[in-house]
Image (spheres, rainbow, N blue to C red):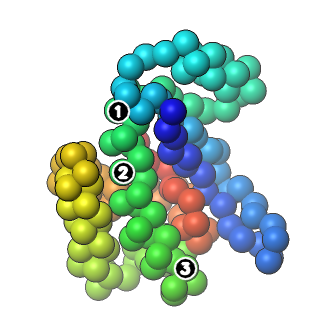
Amino acid sequence: MGSALYFNGVLENDSTVVQKAPGHIVFGEMDHQRSEREDWLSKVFSHADISHKISNTINHEIWKKFIWNNAYNSISAITKTTLEQIHSSEGIFPTIKQMMNEVQQVALAEGIEIQDQIIDEIINIDLSYSDVVSGGFAKMA
């Protein structure tokens, strides 16, 4: 089973991460076949009031998350900027797009096609939780 975890938090000090927005988990069987354990895990998450979704294309979801992480987390970590700060610097978008396209090509080489529209959606994320360093994943539809 694979998963992609979406959260948004900030490193408050050397050992404390503070969650700044609701988290979300996407998970599914790597062979894309529905299973009883997916249903069981969904029930556990529901009982714990954890936002989640079962995906029958989890490989695709994992690659989308990797595209995000490769660009935004790298830039945020190197520059110590928040997502909002990154997005306010228009000059960075060609670099972000290039970084995302490179991962898109690696995904394709692995047999996972990520449409250009997905790249555009990732770039045009909802900035509702953008006041923190992008160490996780901002809210995305």
**Residue name at image x 39 percent, y 70 percent:** 71
Judging depth in this view, the residue of 1 and 76 nearest the camera is 1
Which mark, residue 77?
3
- Secondary structure of the residue carrying tag 1 is loop
**Hey, what amino acid is under mark 2?**
Trp
**In this image, 116 relative to 21: left or right?**
left
Q: Position of residue 10 (x, y in %)?
A: 68, 67
Question: Counting residues from the N terminus, which is met first, the one under dot 3 or under dot 1?
Answer: 1
The three-letter amino acid code for the residue at tag 1 is Thr
- Mark earlier in primary sequence (1, 2): 1
In this image, 105 relative to 13: left or right?
Answer: left
The quarter of the displayed image where residue 105 is located = bottom left
Q: In the rendered image, which residue does mark 2 sit on? A: 63
Q: Is residue 47 above or below residue 13?
A: above
How far apart are labels 3 and 2 at the CA level? 20 Å
Q: Is residue 12 above or below residue 92?
A: above
- The image quadrant where one finds the C terminus is top left
